Amino acid sequence: MKLVVLDRDGVINRDSSAYIKGPGEWEPLPGSLDAIARLTARGFTVVVCTNQSGLARGLFDTADLARIHGRMDSAVRAAGGRLSGIYVCPHGPDDGCRCRKPESGLLEAVGRRLGVSLAGVPVIGDSARDLEAARRAGARPILVLTGNGRRTLAAGNAAGIEHYTDLSAAVDQLIEEAGNVDSEAP
């Protein structure tokens, strides 16, 4: 299985310091839906892992989140892509859970659910917590410079981590690598 894990806010859609609280606030970043469609067309399994502390903060409820994710899923499908799962940490930063990135619990849940090792699996995010969760899970952290990515890079939180201007550029690299691997197969 060729698996790719994406963060949501700042990678697929515009981020907001006031949180994305409803489907009307969800706005895809340029090229992100096409990038997911290209991964799907090349046989990648694409899942989303996202911290959503707005739930714990009471800014929106699970029904609102389901509508947001319904809109995202519909937009991805309309572009020709497919999300094979959306994994959510609903906890706040002080709740001490194992699923909130930078902890690796959410990523580990993906591995258990899909029955795969996360070793070397690309995890694409825009923040230090995404990169750290990937490291802790033994995955391949990849930074995009959308969302909080430029600040993450400027703060020195991505030393030695590959980075790309956006999801589309990261996907170009993954597809190129997959093509090289496919061409080496007997």
Image (tube, rainbow, N blue to C red):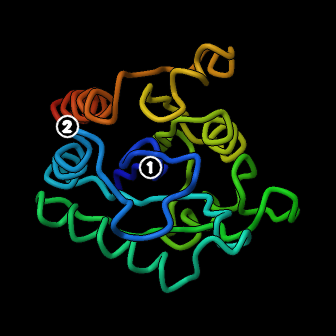
User: Which mark sits nearer the N-terminus, 1 or 2?
Assistant: 1
Q: Quadrant of the C terminus?
A: top left
- Secondary element at image label 2: helix
Picture coordinates of residue 4, whole percent (x, y) = 40, 49
Compute the Cα span from label 1 to label 2. Answer: 23 Å
Number of the front mark, 1 or 2:
1
- Residue 132 vs 154, above or below: the answer is below
Look at 86% across and 65% down and name the residue there: 95
Q: As shown in the figure, which amino acid type bears the numbered disc 1? A: Leu
Look at 16% across and 46% down and name the residue there: 34
- The front one of 155 and 132 is 155
Along the horizontal axis of the image, is 131 left or right of 10?
Answer: right
- Secondary element at image label 1: strand
Look at 12% across and 64% down and name the residue there: 78
Look at 60% across and 35% down and name the residue there: 127
Determine which residue is flagged by label 2: 182
Along the horizontal axis of the image, is 156 left or right of 81?
Answer: right
- The front one of 171 and 153 is 153
Along the horizontal axis of the image, is 40 left or right of 65?
Answer: left
Q: As shown in the figure, which amino acid type bears the numbered disc 2? A: Asp
Residue 6: give its label.
1
- Residue 11 vs 76, above or below: the answer is above
